Image (cartoon, grey):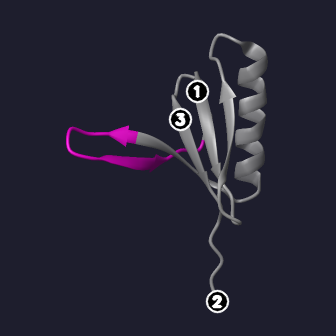
């Protein structure tokens, strides 16, 4: 089971889950991934090491991944 955790600008988050063996849930998650990218969200996957875990930005959806973190674009001023 995979998931996209969507960080929202107002705090909290939303979760979109899929099962890589269920084509319908994969297509819904892939569409959500694209929708978020089109809105300017940065998509990251977790990259674990023996000491720490860090994120790596990704451009394409892969249903084999366990988790993506969607972070909204930050506004500056």
Callout 2: 10 Å neighbours few (<14), some, many (20+)?
few
Query: Any magenta on residue 54?
Result: yes
The numbered mark at residue 77 is: 2
Q: Kindly tell me whether residue 62 is visible in this rendering.
A: no
Question: Between disc 3 and disc 2, whose residue precedes?
Answer: 3
**Of the image marks 1 and 3, the number of the one nearer the N terminus:** 1
Q: Magenta span covers which residues?
A: 47-59
Q: Residues within 10 Å of mark 1 (few under 14, many from 20)?
A: some
Q: Quadrant of residue 9?
A: bottom right
Residue at the image point whose x is 58% and y is 27% from the top: 2
Q: Position of residue 25 (x, y in %)?
A: 74, 21
Residue indicated by mark 3 = 67
Which residue, as the protein is rendered here, is positioned at the far left? 51
Q: Quadrant of the C terminus?
A: bottom right
Quarter of the picture containing the N terminus is top right
Q: Is residue 40 rendered to the left or right of residue 68?
A: right
- Which residue is tagged 1? 2
- Res 26 seen here: yes
């Amino acid at each position: 089971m995979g998931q996209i955790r969507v960080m929202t600008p107002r705090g909290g988050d939303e979760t979109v889950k899929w099962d890589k063996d269920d084509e319908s849930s994969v297509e819904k998650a892939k569409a959500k991934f694209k929708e978020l990218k089109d809105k300017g969200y940065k998509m990251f996957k977790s990259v674990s090491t023996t000491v720490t875990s860090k994120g790596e930005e990704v451009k394409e959806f892969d249903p084999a991944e366990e988790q993506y973190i969607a972070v909204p674009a930050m506004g500056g001023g």
